[in-house]
Image: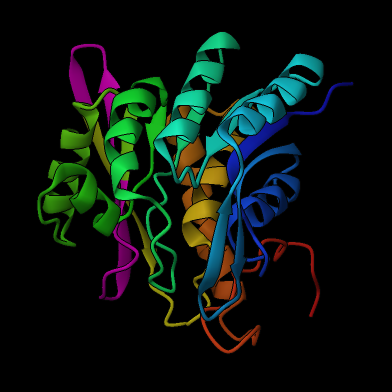
Amino acid sequence: MTPIRVLTIAGSDSGGGAGIQADLKTFSALGCYGMSAITALTAQNTLGVRGIHDAPASFVGDQIDAVIEDIGVDAVKIGMLSSPEIIDVVAERLIRHSVKRVVLDPVMVATSGDKLLRDDAIAALKGRLFPLAGIVTPNMREAEVLLNIPVQEDPSALESAARALLTLGPGAALVKGGHGSGAEAADVLAMRRHDSVSVEVLRAPRVETPNTHGTGCTLSSAIAAYWARGSDLPEAVRAAKAYIAGAIAAAAEWKVGAGHGPVHHFYPWWKE
């Protein structure tokens, strides 16, 4: 039996809460075999990012080739890509290997506020990778940067942003409102449907907690995992939304570090 195989192409988080560490935990929690191509090393913890060391672009390509040529892949999640050179290599490898299910999380800023994407990489991200993505998953602030417009938290504004992101080429756009306020965290999914666009609002109770490090990484990885396991894309997004809501709630009382702690990726199985 061949397990469901999901590859993360992203940066490493030495604190374990985000990046490839969060991705691999999510894949395992959701019954998938996780693999990784590391785009950057970060020195970070719950308080912030102390340093970033990019991997050579050609070596990122070598990692992707090594994994796909031998093991194969059922879905790919893309996270932190800090330079145009790395973005170009990732785009070329997705085309070369005919990857069908691509979840792109346009990581720009860490939960701590530290910048993770160079300004000159934004245009490359939109021009090279958005057209190859089955779905992109920016939060409100990332959507603002990508579209160069203000994005408010209300569902109508999130919908407008999601529809605008579709014009950049992805098959679907999930704009996340979790960084806002209010009793509920609402995300808006816009998806191409032949000659039209379908829109769905996904809601979950907002949990007041500092432990939100890696939420975006975890959500996008969960989408990739459910999608790879056979769910259609809207079903995968709904299931991933429920999973991250549970992971946030389960970690609400955790104390990991002095800043923004991680979510609880294995909450259905760990017994406190």
Res 248 visible: yes
Residue 198 to residue 187: above or below: above
Q: Position of residue 185 (x, y in %)?
A: 33, 64
Q: How many marks?
A: 0
Residue plotted at (51% across, 37% down) = 236
Q: Position of residue 49 (x, y in %)?
A: 52, 70
Residue plotted at (32% across, 67% down) = 179
Residue plotted at (79% across, 80% down) = 272
Q: Main secondary structure of the magenta part?
A: strand
- Residue 196 in the magenta stretch? The answer is yes
Judge from the rendering whether residue 199 lies leftward or rightward of residue 235; answer left or right. left
Judge from the rendering whether residue 236 lies leftward or rightward of residue 16; answer left or right. left
Q: How is the image coloured?
A: rainbow
* In the image, farthest residue toward the right: 1
The quadrant where residue 53 appears: bottom right
Residue plotted at (74% across, 19% down) = 72
The quadrant where residue 251 appears: bottom right
Q: Position of residue 112 (x, y in %)?
A: 43, 74
Res 235 visible: no
- Residue 218 in the magenta stretch? The answer is no
Indicate the quadrant containing the N terminus: top left, top right, bottom left or bottom right: top right
Q: Position of residue 257 (x, y in %)?
A: 63, 85
Q: 224 or 169: which is nearer to us?
A: 169
The quadrant where residue 3 appears: top right
Magenta-drawn segment: 175-197
